[in-house]
Image (cartoon, helix red, strand yellow):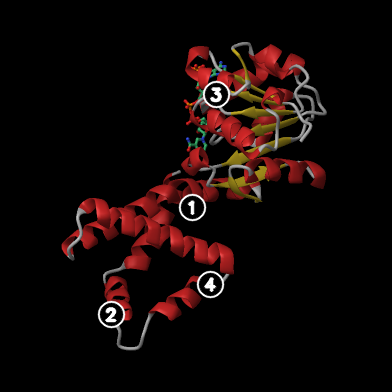
Amino acid sequence: MNKRITIIGGGNLGGSIAEGLVASELVQPDFITVTRRKLHLIKHLTDMRINTIDDNLEAVQGADIVILAVKPKQCINIINEIKPNLSKEAIMVSVVTGISIREMSDAAGNGMPIFRAMPNTAIAIRESMTCIATNHNSQEDRDLVVQIFEQVGDAIIIEEELMNASTVLGACGIAYALRFVRAASQGGIEIGFSSRVAQRIAAQTVKGAASLLAKNGQHPEHEIDKVTTPQGCTIAGLNEMEHQGFSSSLIKGIKTSYEKI
Ligand SMILES: NC(=O)c1ccc[n+]([C@@H]2O[C@H](COP(=O)([O-])OP(=O)(O)OC[C@H]3O[C@@H](n4cnc5c(N)ncnc54)[C@H](OP(=O)(O)O)[C@@H]3O)[C@@H](O)[C@H]2O)c1
């Protein structure tokens, strides 16, 4: 890809995006610039031949895509700081939680295309689920932004009004899934495994189950049917979990997170 990408805020997320893009070979490292104030903390990016700089205004000069990866309270100040050098042909992509496209568009003031993206922490290993919203109609630019986040996992475009819902299901969802793994591991210890082996079995089993859905595209129940022999142990355990409120507690938890966000 022949685009100059500037990432403002080379922290957990900004750094992961830069590293993911380089690892995917979609973008040459010298086409990427990452900023933060404590530059010594991103020396590993410099070692990968990514440009690093602490001057945001200079960093966005000539950028085709500007990715904002700072904390929410810094977002609008930073747009005000960089706007003298923001081209209206450039694309702005924000991974900042809770700042709307309208707020960013008002701050930028030049009518440039603005995207919001909500990745999750698996972005660090290029396995994020990233939901993207935009006010911009160009299919080419939409595809471009999706393509960027596909280098660090899966990515889809959603309506902006669903950004909070995507945060709950996709970003908080990492914690829900990990709590499942922890509970399964604890069950595994009860039936005889060491905690290390139980966690390894539980984690790989969850990964395999998720991959079955991703690869086969079937409803979960279709795969469950293959495991549940009549009068067998799987259906007995599964039904006991449901009697104890398994699905119900997950759905209620997701709704509670959504009410709280
Ligand atoms: N982590 C997640 O899973 C996740 C998921 C979805 C969305 N988000 C959102 O993504 C954003 C970033 O999250 P994060 O976890 O990556 O936070 P983080 O690790 O704290 O990264 C923020 C970075 O911004 C830099 N920064 C602060 N002020 C700056 C300035 N004036 N100029 C340039 N860089 C500046 C900080 O470095 P210096 O202090 O050295 O400047 C820091 O490295 C947040 O808004 C968060 O809500 C995070």
As helix, strand or loop, the secondary structure at mark 2 comes to: helix
Instruction: Inspect the image, locate mark 1, and give the three-letter code of the amino acid beneath it.
Output: Leu
Q: Amino acid at mark 2?
A: Cys
Tell me the residue that label 1 is attached to: 169
Q: Earlier in the sequence, mark 4 or mark 2?
A: 4
Q: Circles 2 and 3: CB distance less than 8 Å? A: no
Choose top left, top right, bottom left or bottom right for residue 104. Answer: top right
- In the foreground, 49 or 230: 49
For ligand 1, tell me if the residue under mark 3 lies within 8 Å.
Answer: yes
- Disc 3 residue crowd, few under 14, some 14–19, many 20+, Cα 10 Å: many
**Residue ID at (63%, 43%):** 151
Q: Is residue 171 left or right of residue 193?
A: right
Q: CA distance from mark 4 to mark 2?
A: 22 Å
Earlier residue among tags 1 and 2: 1
Q: Secondary structure at mark 1?
A: helix
Q: Earlier in the sequence, mark 1 or mark 4?
A: 1
The residue labelled by disc 2 is: 233
